[in-house]
Image (cartoon, helix red, strand yellow):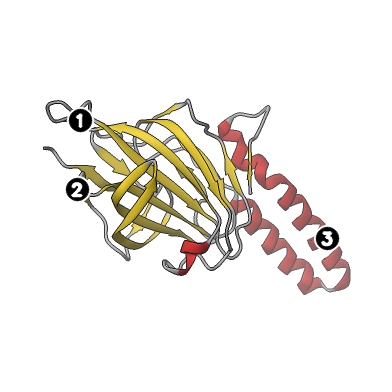
């Protein structure tokens, strides 16, 4: 499900990830054109879409202290509280972002933090827009330690944050570009998902104020989705 790129920069990874797909689509379009002209045009449109899917735009995250930004482009489909038992233990505030096949599929760090843990969980590949059903899907969890801008006395301000990359009906692979032991800045690229999927952001309940609601469109590394509550 997950691969580690070697010999390439993180910025190049999204584009290079798409090269085999673009080549395959081009060959199919060429063969189709020898059969029917309309099939060739359809193949060309599909090839353009495949190349567009693997786009990886440069973005400058505002990186306002104490703000968490969306880890993905897409549609917010749920804002709720769930029980978490990995890295973040206890009740967690969750923001769910569904990525359609038309969205940029590069995931980004929601906040400047230390990446301290990574976990893969096998599972199914149900449609990712089904918030409840997709709970059975295969996923990768990235555990971060962020810092609250105004820690309370006796608290060093370290806050566990989890980004969950979930496969969908068409997604069969999660590509990872960041690994435990690295420090990421808000908006840094973490990896990418393929062809329609979902990304969740979890923070300890009671530590953040959510700034979005279901139905909102968000842009990875740009749209503020929550901010730490000052205690």
Q: Residue at x 52, y 58 (%)?
A: 197
1 or 3: mark nearer the eye: 1
Mark 1 → mark 2, Cα distance in angstroms = 15 Å
Residue linked to disc 1: 149
CA gap between label 1 and label 3 equals 56 Å
The residue positioned 61% from the left and 63% from the top of the image is 170
Sequence order check, earlier mark of 1 and 2: 1
**Pointer 2 with pointer 3, Cβ within 8 A:** no
The tag earlier along the polypeptide, 2 or 3, is 3
User: Which label's residue is closer to the chain start, 1 or 3?
Assistant: 3
Please state which of residues 33 and 85 is positioned toward the viewer in this rendering.
85
Dot 3 lies on which element? helix
Asked whether, in this view, residue 214 is left or right of residue 178, the answer is: left
State whether residue 135 is above or below residue 118.
below
Q: Which residue is mark 2?
A: 206
Circle 3 Cα neighbour tier, 10 Å, few/some/many (<14 / 14–19 / ≥20): some
Is residue 14 left or right of 133 when viewed as pictured? right
Determine whether, in the image, residue 106 is placed left or right of residue 210.
right
Q: Position of residue 23 (x, y in %)?
A: 77, 50
Location of residue 22 in the rendering, given as x and y in whole percent from the top left corner? 72, 51
Q: What crowding class fits label 2: few (fewer than 14 Cα within 10 Å), some (14-19), or many (20 or more)? A: few
Quick check: 52 above or below 137? above
The residue at 63%/56% (across/down) is: 172
Marks 1, 2: nearer the viewer: 2
Q: Nearer the viewer, residue 220 or 230?
A: 230
Q: Which residue is mark 3?
A: 30
**Whole-percent x, y for residue 96 in the image:** 38, 57
Crowdedness of circle 1 by 10 Å Cα count: few (<14), some, many (20+)? some
User: Residue 113 placed where, x, y %?
Assistant: 36, 31
State whether residue 151 appears in this view. Answer: yes
Q: Quadrant of residue 183?
A: top left
> Residue placed farthest to the right in the image?
34
């Amino acid at each position: 499900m997950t691969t580690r790129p070697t010999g390439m920069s993180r910025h190049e990874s999204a584009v290079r990830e798409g090269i085999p797909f673009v080549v395959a689509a081009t060959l199919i379009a060429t063969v189709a054109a020898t059969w029917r002209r309309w099939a060739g045009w359809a193949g060309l449109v599909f090839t353009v879409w495949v190349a567009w899917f693997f786009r990886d735009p440069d973005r400058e995250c505002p990186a306002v202290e104490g703000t968490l930004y969306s880890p993905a482009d897409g549609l917010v489909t749920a804002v709720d509280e769930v029980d978490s038992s990995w890295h973040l233990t206890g009740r967690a505030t969750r923001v769910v972002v569904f990525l359609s096949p038309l969205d940029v599929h590069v995931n980004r760090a929601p906040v400047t933090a230390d990446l301290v843990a990574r976990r893969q969980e096998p599972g199914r590949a149900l449609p990712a827009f089904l918030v409840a059903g997709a709970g059975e899907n295969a996923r990768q969890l990235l555990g971060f330690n962020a810092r609250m801008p105004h820690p309370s006395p006796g608290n060093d301000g370290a806050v566990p944050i989890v980004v969950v990359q979930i496969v969908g009906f068409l997604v069969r692979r999660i590509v990872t570009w960041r690994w435990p032991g690295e420090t990421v800045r808000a908006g840094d690229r973490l990896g990418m998902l393929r062809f329609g999927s979902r990304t969740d952001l979890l923070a300890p309940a009671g530590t953040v104020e959510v700034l979005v609601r279901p139905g909102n469109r968000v842009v990875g590394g740009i749209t503020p989705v929550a901010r730490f509550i000052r205690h």
